[in-house]
Image (cartoon, rainbow, N blue to C red):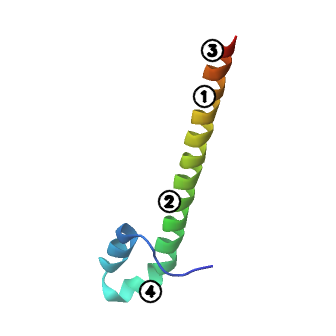
Amino acid sequence: MRNELVTAFWQKAARSLPAPYRERYQSHFVRAEQWELAFGEVADLVSRAKSRLARSVSSRAHSA
């Protein structure tokens, strides 16, 4: 499991903490970022599935 932040938003959020708290809460920021990235992946997957379903239904309607 990685322990570094990859997105600019979460890096900036972590840097905004006072130095004594950064290390203490680093894992919280990493986990929040992981959740955010996972939700983004799920949203992309649902969007692609919705598009494919819409094309499928549309092509069936035209061929009938």
**Which of label 3 and label 4 is nearer to you?**
3
Tag of residue 33: none
Report, in whole angstroms, how far the alpha carbon at label 3 lies from the one at label 4. 59 Å
> Residue 59 appears at what percent x and percent y?
64, 22
Graded by Cα atoms within 10 Å as few (under 14), some (14 to 19) or many (20 or more), the crowding at tag 4 reads: few
Report, in whole angstroms, how far the alpha carbon at label 1 lies from the one at label 2. 29 Å
**Mark 4–mark 1 contact, CB under 8 Å?**
no
Q: Secondary structure at mark 3?
A: helix
Question: Residue at position x 49%, y 81% from top?
Answer: 4
Tag of residue 62: 3
- N-terminal label among 3 and 4: 4
Q: Amino acid at mark 1?
A: Arg
The residue under label 4 is: 23
Q: Amino acid at mark 2?
A: Glu
The residue under label 1 is: 55
Question: Residue at position x 34%, y 71% from top?
Answer: 13
Graded by Cα atoms within 10 Å as few (under 14), some (14 to 19) or many (20 or more), the crowding at tag 2 reads: few
**Mark 3–mark 4 contact, CB under 8 Å?**
no
Residue closest to the far bottom: 20
**Mark 2–mark 4 contact, CB under 8 Å?**
no
Report, in whole angstroms, how far the alpha carbon at label 2 lies from the one at label 4. 20 Å
Residue in front for this viewpoint, 4 or 26: 4
Report, in whole angstroms, how far the alpha carbon at label 4 lies from the one at label 1. 49 Å
Question: Which image quadrant for residue 10?
Answer: bottom left
Question: Residue at position x 38%, y 83% from top?
Answer: 21
> Residue 44 appears at what percent x and percent y?
54, 48
Report, in whole angstroms, how far the alpha carbon at label 3 lies from the one at label 1. 11 Å
How many discs appear? 4
Residue 47 is left or right of residue 14, and the answer is right
Graded by Cα atoms within 10 Å as few (under 14), some (14 to 19) or many (20 or more), the crowding at tag 3 reads: few
**Which of label 4 and label 1 is nearer to you?**
1
